[in-house]
């Protein structure tokens, strides 16, 4: 197994680890129609994304909150209340057209909601601000520099205005699952490297008794196979360790206390740690 193939596999491994991507700028796109009921897995994933977005919102990181809440609504499109939270985050991030789309979608999917008229007035106010901003030269008019309304944003105190994605305040963050899945991917890549290379090493050991090869080309291939076997072993063991740590982190992390209940003492948190020399396996020797 040559070095180019190893490099390609390593690139695949790194690309497979999930990364959080911020919400894209530009014109807002309509939300897909909600035609199916979410599965239990979808609801659980939506709860995790909702809580992660709530934490980002409370920290003032509105772009990341948008990313998490958009993902939560994509997984559970019946949690329409998320659209109100998204609208507020978009407004604070300066994306008024996105906020208008979220509120219009909320009203369209909740025609009998008691706050429908209030939300419609909010939509009209946002559209007025957009029109003023577009009419101002170079976007420097009052609408472009005006601060958001002084009212407290939805959910910045202790709980979101609409708790539908996270009933009872329960649920776990999905981040540890991403860590565990990334570790699993590394372990699989390691196995793909290790087992073929181990078979090649045995073949070359038969061709090179006492590690004496008939010519330099065979020796070079034998050493390359030995390197691939070593790398595969390190990736396999390290990936399994990261996967185990991620899933342990997920199941042992404390869940938020229910609203109105007595706060409990925080449980022990398990965080996976992988460092050079801490996890690994090596195969010594050369031909």
Image (cartoon, rainbow, N blue to C red):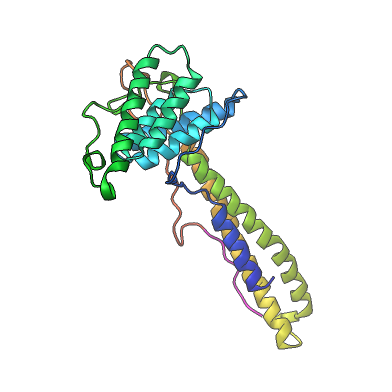
Which residues fall within the magenta stretch?
Answer: 280-287
The C terminus is located in which quarter?
bottom right
Q: What residue lies at 70% left-to-right and 82% top-to-bottom?
A: 219
Q: Nearer the viewer, residue 251 or 29?
A: 29
Indicate yes or no whether the magenta region holds residue 95: no
Indicate yes or no whether the magenta region holds residue 283: yes
Q: Nearer the viewer, residue 287 or 106?
A: 106
Indicate whether 269 appears above or below 187. above
Classify residue 86 by image quadrant. Answer: top left
Q: Is residue 269 left or right of residue 39?
A: left
Classify residue 228 by image quadrant. Answer: bottom right
Residue 17 locus on image (x, y percent): 53, 51
Residue 264 locus on image (x, y percent): 33, 23
Q: Is residue 139 left or right of residue 228?
A: left
Q: Main secondary structure of the magenta part?
A: loop
Q: Is residue 64 left or right of residue 228?
A: left
């Amino acid at each position: 197994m040559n070095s180019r193939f190893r490099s390609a596999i390593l690139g695949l491994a790194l690309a497979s680890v999930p990364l959080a991507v911020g919400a894209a700028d530009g014109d807002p796109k309509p939300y897909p129609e909600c035609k199916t009921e979410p599965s239990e897995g979808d609801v659980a994933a939506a709860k995790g994304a909702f809580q992660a977005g709530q934490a980002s919102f409370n920290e003032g990181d509105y772009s990341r909150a948008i990313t998490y809440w958009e993902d939560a609504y994509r997984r559970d499109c019946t949690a329409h209340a998320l659209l109100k939270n998204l609208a507020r985050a978009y407004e604070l991030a300066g994306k008024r057209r996105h906020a208008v789309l979220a509120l219009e979608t909320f009203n369209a999917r909740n025609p009998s909601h008691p706050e429908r008229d209030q939300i419609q007035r909010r939509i009209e106010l946002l559209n007025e601000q957009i029109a003023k901003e577009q009419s101002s030269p170079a976007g420097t008019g009052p609408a472009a520099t005006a601060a958001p309304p002084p009212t407290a944003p939805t959910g910045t105190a202790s709980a979101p205005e609409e708790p539908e994605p996270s009933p009872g305040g329960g649920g776990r963050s999905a981040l540890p699952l991403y860590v565990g899945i990334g570790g699993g991917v590394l372990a699989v890549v390691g196995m793909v490297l290790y087992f073929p290379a181990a078979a090649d090493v045995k073949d070359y050991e038969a061709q090179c008794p006492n590690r004496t090869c008939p010519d330099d080309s065979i020796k070079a291939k034998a050493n390359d196979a030995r390197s691939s076997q070593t790398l595969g072993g390190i990736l396999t063991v390290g990936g399994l360790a990261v996967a185990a740590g991620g899933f342990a982190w997920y199941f042992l992390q404390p869940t938020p206390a229910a609203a109105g209940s007595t706060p409990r003492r925080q449980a022990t948190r398990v965080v996976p740690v992988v460092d050079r020399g801490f996890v690994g396996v090596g195969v010594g020797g050369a031909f």
